[in-house]
Image (spheres, rainbow, N blue to C red):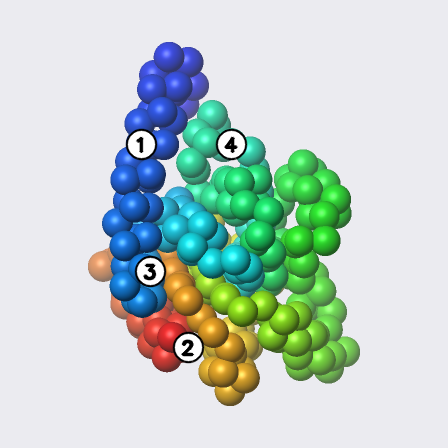
Amino acid sequence: GQPLDKNLLERINTEMDSTYAELKQFMMKDLQAGKKIVTIGGDHSVSLPALSACADFFDDLAILHFDAHADLRRAYEGFTHSHASIMYNIYNQFSNVNFEQIGVRDFSEDELKTINSTNRINTYFGDDISDDRLKNKLHNQFEEILDRLSGFSHIYISFDIDGLDAPYCPSTGTPVPGGLSFHEATYILLSLRKRQLNIVGADLVEVCPTNSNDLGKGYDEIIGAQLLKHIISCL
């Protein structure tokens, strides 16, 4: 529970800069070869090299970001490459990237200020999802999001499984009530296919295996595998 020594923290951040830069170069070679990138991870920070490579490679890029969290913190507990900072890092480094965030319902005051200060980030909050679901307006909101995405030549899907409502991912590290249902998420993914939008990369992160003693053994993995199937089909 004690904060890390400042010198050690700076060393970790510096070494992560070097590691991610090296990984990014591998991914740039794949993009130059006409390939698409799919990252399957642990915490959301593993997607940074792929996102950075796509942002560098394509003139315009929209990130469709499913998440309970905005991930727009400048740093988290001193770590500049944390899972809570990934979208801030991309937003701060690349002016050609826009964001469509869906399901955000756990965020800081500074993150909200960032969202409200720019037209590059459109955030559809968890409360909005719940309200529109009750008012039978959810379909219209999804179509508006898809319409905005249709204005971009290149789209990257970044799917943190905690963008789903907590019962769909009970073992993930930071579940939050009030997210998307499985079918609402797959509706958006299927709609991307139907519109034939150009998906250039994707990730699925934060899927955590269920404890073998839990009654719901395997549930998180099943949901994750089904989501991954739909995500890959978009590519």
**For this view, does 26 lie left or right of residue 135?**
left
Which of labels 2 and 1 is toward the front?
Answer: 1
Structural distance between the alpha carbons of marks 2 and 1: 32 Å
User: Pointer 1: what residue?
Assistant: 18
User: Pointer 4: what residue?
Assistant: 75
User: Pointer 2: what residue?
Assistant: 234
Question: Element at badge 2?
Answer: helix
**For this view, does 21 lie left or right of residue 212?**
right
On screen, residue 175 above or below 85: below
Residue 144 in the image: x percent, y percent? 69, 74
Which of labels 4 and 2 is toward the front?
Answer: 2
Q: Amino acid at mark 4?
A: Ala
Structural distance between the alpha carbons of marks 3 and 2: 17 Å
Which of labels 4 and 3 is toward the front?
Answer: 3
Examine the rendering and report whether any part of residue 221 can be seen.
Answer: no
Question: Element at badge 4?
Answer: loop
Structural distance between the alpha carbons of marks 3 and 1: 20 Å
